[in-house]
Amino acid sequence: MSRHNIVLNVNGKQTSLEVESDRSLLDVIREDLELTGSKRGCDNGDCGACTVLVNGKPVNSCLVLAVQADGQDVSTIEGVALGDELHPIQEAFIEHGAVQCGFCTPAMIMNAKALLEEIPQPTNEEIKQAILGTLCRCTGYIQIVDAIHSCGRSKK
Amino acid sequence: MKKFRYVGVGVNRVDAIGKVTGETKYAADLKLSGMCYGKILLSTYPRARVLRIDTRSAESLAGVRKIITAKDITGNNRYGYYIPHRPALVGEGEETRYIGDAIALIVADTYATACEALKLIKVDYEILIPLTSPKEAMDMEAYLVHKEEEGNVASRHELIHGDVKAGFEASDVVIEQTYVTSRQEQAFLESEAGVAFVDESGILHIYSCLQDPYDVVEDIYLALGIPKSKIHVKATPSGGAFGGKLNTTIQVQLAAMAYIARVPVQLVLDREESFIFHPKRHPDEIWIKIGASSDGKIHALEAEVISDAGPYAVRTNEVLGLTVSALVGPYSLPNVHLTGKAIYTNNLDSSAFRGFGAPQAAVAREGIIEKLARVLEMNSLVLRQKNFLKSGEETLSHVLGDSPVSLDLLKDRIIEKMGPIPESKPDSGRRIGRAFGFDMPVFDVSAIPLLCKSGVGIAVELFSDASVAIYAGGTELGQGSATIMAQIAAEELGLKMNKVFVEMGDTWTCPRAGRTSASRLTYVLGNALLLATEKIRDRLIQRAAEMLEIHKDDLLLVDGEIQAKGSSSKGLSIRKVAEACSNEGVKLREEGWFKYPEDRYMYGHTFMASAADVEVDLITGEIKILKLVNVHDSGKVINPVLAKGQLYGGSIQALGYALTEDLIVQDCKLLTPSFAEYLIPTAMDIPEEFLADFVETPYPTGPYGAKGLAEHSLNTTTPAILNAICNAVGIDICTIPIKPEYILENLKT
């Protein structure tokens, strides 16, 4: 397996890594950078639990090779809160009961973050479209949709 | 009425911050120093005799620490709830019983090496013909999956009341139908995972996602022969479970890896392995016959359930028992004869899944009642109401409950929430239908004197800084039990929520609490917690009485203070009193032990109603859920935000059960091994209008009047959707999930 030197800008921090060509961005985030907030639910692009933002767009990090992310901006759940202060999306998830087991929560929040950057006041339909790629087995999605919707409203 | 500060309030989850920041560590996120990685070699064939296992090439691969086969196991190599007959590893000369049986365990320096080593293990099998269905397995000539289980019968149940023959004779209308339900996968997003290590004193530690840490200890003891006192199991936060982690999953194999290889090991199943490994909802075939007079009074119900138990006993006996008794539902039926048989096969295993056998029964029962209404040309809601169980009436089932009956209240509330039925526009090519479903699911009150189901403990310690720790042996699966415990403790001890720490699912720190299932934690742990906090509160007040020289009956514990009644100026902070107790050796750690006063096979009942408006496209067969409402009577609701979350989540699992979820197993092999083939609902599948509500009839023995809650929401949404489809387009639905293709085919004929 060939090895490559790459640079990832993860949560605003430049990180140089040597990676094997077959390793996914998720492998590198979880194992090399020890950012375990991004979850491995299927390793197959089906569940979306590994969703991170690459240059602001949500991707299944299990389907992206680490080398493909060379030189890109990568945002993970660990970079969402400002120190001890939660991001409004995180606050909204807590208040609306959008969190149960929590396994999809980081991915859902990353989806929400990308959506709200692009559409500050999304409709429920737009919210559902935005989180469509991330499965949640606990909540029935409604409280997640409500939480994201409330962030749009509070931005008015 | 007493005003509560935390009970009945939708306070934030105590574990929410870690979950929204990604800091919460699930089992696969743990990393121990020197940790190796495990992999399980599963059987290639559902039924085969293992002739020879050649591990030599795998062992010689660089980075492999240990390859373990049955020969290395020092215990009796068998484990399992109810009947410990599942092999930890199938050895040479033994037969496999399904594709989830383990043949060998690999421990290697990296996960990649473990995967490579797996391919190098050569197993010679003598392939044998498997039993692919209960029908085959019931044949007199069929081989026995377990030698001692005659006819491959894993379990049998019968419920007889009155005279069903006379009931049918007295009926004006008698109809029957056979319903076939699918094998539903729990589809928790976090697959089975854990880490294990043996410490320098020889203690085996297991950190893993699970629902019953005490049963895991039992199974490791049985299979590996390690004394129970040397096993420490700690539940990690679980990324969903829904019954799929109720029986011991990977923990026995994981324990064997760490114990035999003597290195810390992490074992995480990939999605396909997970789908294969843990037991599913039983696929059932239910024949049901109902008789009623023309005014709608039901006189008789007869049914026969044939359930696919899969290869091992696990929870089959209890699940089937609940399926049979749940066929009665929330109705008063004078004559019933219900039988059920669960049959061993070589298919994937079957056991617990949210609803525990009741959802299958609900599909059949609510389905046949809807059909009866059509035959009688009667409104099905009126028909149901006419036959509702009445207050004070005894339920027929052996799982007798003592909950106040509130079916009429539920019916009124759900009608109000549903509002007027939308009309199908004549030229739209779409038809709209509505249906209601009712049930009275059970929750465990800890009265069953067998298999560690009776008696539940909890420990509470108040520290000198007036912070409090609760050690609760249930597990946090996402349902929110840690938060419920914190709310109750804060309420009872007059402290703020942020002063309460809840530790869950640790067999070293928590008193025995049994399993996390059957919607039992709020009730059983809540009651145990009240017993413990009462002792601590009394002791604090007693000590404060001495310090203040006021009689204890004249003192109140409120808002972090112990105050004289009627004079808030005269008091002491709890911290001061706790400090005094601590300095003087007054005990502020207490255990609450809750045991239901009676030892009999008994659960409590909740009552529930679901209703759905469904639109069916006549051209494409596409089904759209316009509105879905669930109303439950779970007694006092301790946290309405979390409680609604349970109703929403459960009913969307039920929607999947009705419309898409079918784990297809053909010739005992899994054809749908991923989320690309096994479709669970996405955000796009939720109803346009989606409501959850509660009627709160206090349950006399529940903490603050609370009952169980989390498991139930699955039961009635499925039949409500199916019957609504049926009412929209007039076709019988007897097999789930129902697909657009089926609707189109049946519309044509």
Image: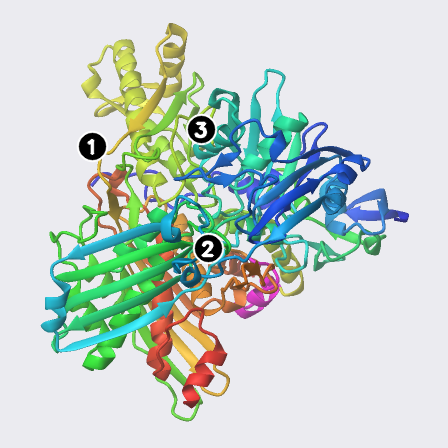
User: Does A49 sit left or right of B376 as displayed?
Assistant: right
The label on residue B619 is none
Q: Which residue is mark 1?
A: B597
At label 2, which amino acid type do we have?
Thr
At label 3, which amino acid type do we have?
Lys
Q: Kindly indicate whether the residues beneath marks 2 and 1 are on one polypeptide chain.
A: yes
Give the Cα separation between the discs numbered 2 and 1: 39 Å
Decide: few, some or many residues near mark 1? Use Cα within 10 Å; few <14, some 14-19, many ≥20: few
**Mark 1: secondary structure:** loop
Q: Which residue is mark 3?
A: B499
Give the Cα separation between the discs numbered 2 and 3: 52 Å
Q: Residue sitting at 28 percent across and 45 percent down?
A: B707
The quarter of the image holding the C terminus of chain B is bottom left
Pick the residue in front: B628 or B143: B143
Q: Which residues are magenta?
A: A120-135
Count of marks, rendered view: 3
Q: Position of residue B367 (x, y in %)?
A: 30, 70
Pick the residue in front: B218 or B304: B304
**Mark 2: secondary structure:** loop
Q: Kindly indicate whether the residues beneath marks 2 and 3 are on one polypeptide chain.
A: yes
Decide: few, some or many residues near mark 2? Use Cα within 10 Å; few <14, some 14-19, many ≥20: many
Subunit under mark 2: B
At label 1, which amino acid type do we have?
Pro
Q: Nearer the viewer, mark 2 or mark 3?
A: 2
Q: Position of residue B372 (x, y in %)?
A: 23, 75
Residue A96 can be seen, yes or no: no
Q: Which residue is mark 2?
A: B345
Q: Position of residue B665 (x, y in %)?
A: 53, 62
